[in-house]
């Protein structure tokens, strides 16, 4: 059977106020293209069952992580959080870590993983560091040799950026494997865990492959999805 991949989404509400869970379809479409079967996590009390059922976990992009989870107060009114999602992802991450099953984080995904392992975040790149990494900016990241991304893409790759936050202090067990720059500052763009099958990226690979890519200059990210699905098939 093809690997079953659990994906997380964000909370919202229907027109009549009914609470919803939502996920951009390109995450699921690329998991399918890479040979996996995508399913969406929709309940905060099913973490253990999800982890027993699924072969891997993909933490998708979305709203900001609650700053109190990394020991800070909210610094800006435009830091928008999703407490129900924070709770769901913390529970699911723990369940997958306990089972040593693969986890891949994308954008918000790298941030919640970093915070889960005890790291911190820069709450706003333009204000605190200067520069802009939002709205699809395309830029180069330097890759660590003999890392997951280094083995897939070599010394560097072109990626997109839709984030206003960045990793600051790295969480325990996480190793930086890609770096970007903003206004003369160098910061971590991807990590992998030293002992667990966990890795994550700050950019949006789901928008860098398939029939519609944004921006077109970026590297094709299908190999990243294929690598993750193969991880989950082991």
Image (spheres, rainbow, N blue to C red):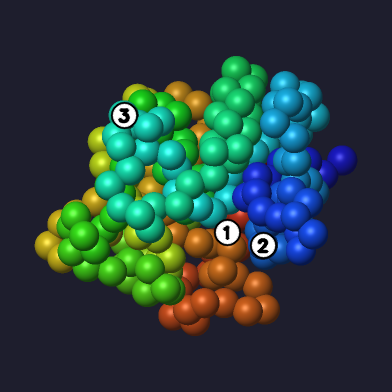
189 left or right, relative to 87 = left
Of residues 126 and 161, the one nearer the viewer is 126
Q: How far apart are the two marked residues, 3 and 1, measured between alpha carbons? A: 36 Å
Q: Which residue is mark 1?
A: 223
126 left or right, relative to 60 = left
Compared with 71, 213 (above or below) is below
Q: How far apart are the two marked residues, 2 and 3, measured between alpha carbons? A: 30 Å
Measured as percent of width and height from the top left, residue 13 is found at 71, 55
Of residues 111 and 173, the one nearer the viewer is 111
Q: Earlier in the sequence, mark 2 or mark 3?
A: 2
Secondary structure found at label 1: helix
Secondary structure found at label 3: loop
**Do we see residue 30 in this rendering?**
no
Q: Which residue is mark 2?
A: 24
Measured as percent of width and height from the top left, residue 37 is found at 80, 49
Measured as percent of width and height from the top left, residue 42 is found at 75, 41
Q: Are marks 3 and 1 in contact (CB under 8 Å)?
A: no
Of residues 152 and 228, the one nearer the viewer is 228
153 left or right, relative to 53 = left
Circle on res. 71? 3
């Amino acid at each position: 059977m093809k690997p079953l991949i659990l994906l997380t989404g964000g909370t919202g509400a229907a027109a009549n106020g009914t609470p919803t869970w939502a996920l951009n379809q390109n995450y699921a479409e690329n998991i399918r293209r890479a040979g996996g079967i995508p399913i969406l996590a929709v309940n905060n009390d099913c973490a253990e069952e999800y982890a027993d059922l699924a072969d891997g976990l993909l933490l998708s992009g979305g709203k900001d992580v609650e700053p109190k989870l990394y020991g800070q107060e909210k610094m800006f009114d435009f830091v928008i959080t999703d407490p129900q999602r924070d709770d769901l992802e913390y529970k699911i991450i723990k369940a997958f870590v306990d089972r040593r099953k693969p986890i891949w984080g994308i954008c918000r995904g790298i941030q919640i993983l970093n915070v889960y392992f005890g790291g911190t975040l820069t709450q706003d790149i333009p204000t605190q560091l200067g520069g802009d990494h939002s709205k699809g900016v395309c830029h180069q990241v330097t890759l660590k040799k003999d890392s997951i991304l280094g083995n897939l893409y070599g010394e560097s790759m072109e990626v997109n950026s839709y984030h206003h936050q960045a990793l600051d202090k790295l969480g325990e067990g996480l190793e930086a494997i890609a770096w970007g720059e903003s206004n003369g500052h160098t910061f971590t763009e991807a990590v992998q865990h030293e002992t667990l099958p966990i890795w994550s990226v700050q950019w949006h690979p789901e928008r860098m492959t398939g029939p519609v890519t944004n921006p077109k200059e970026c590297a094709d990210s299908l190999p990243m999805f294929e690598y993750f699905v193969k991880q989950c098939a082991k």
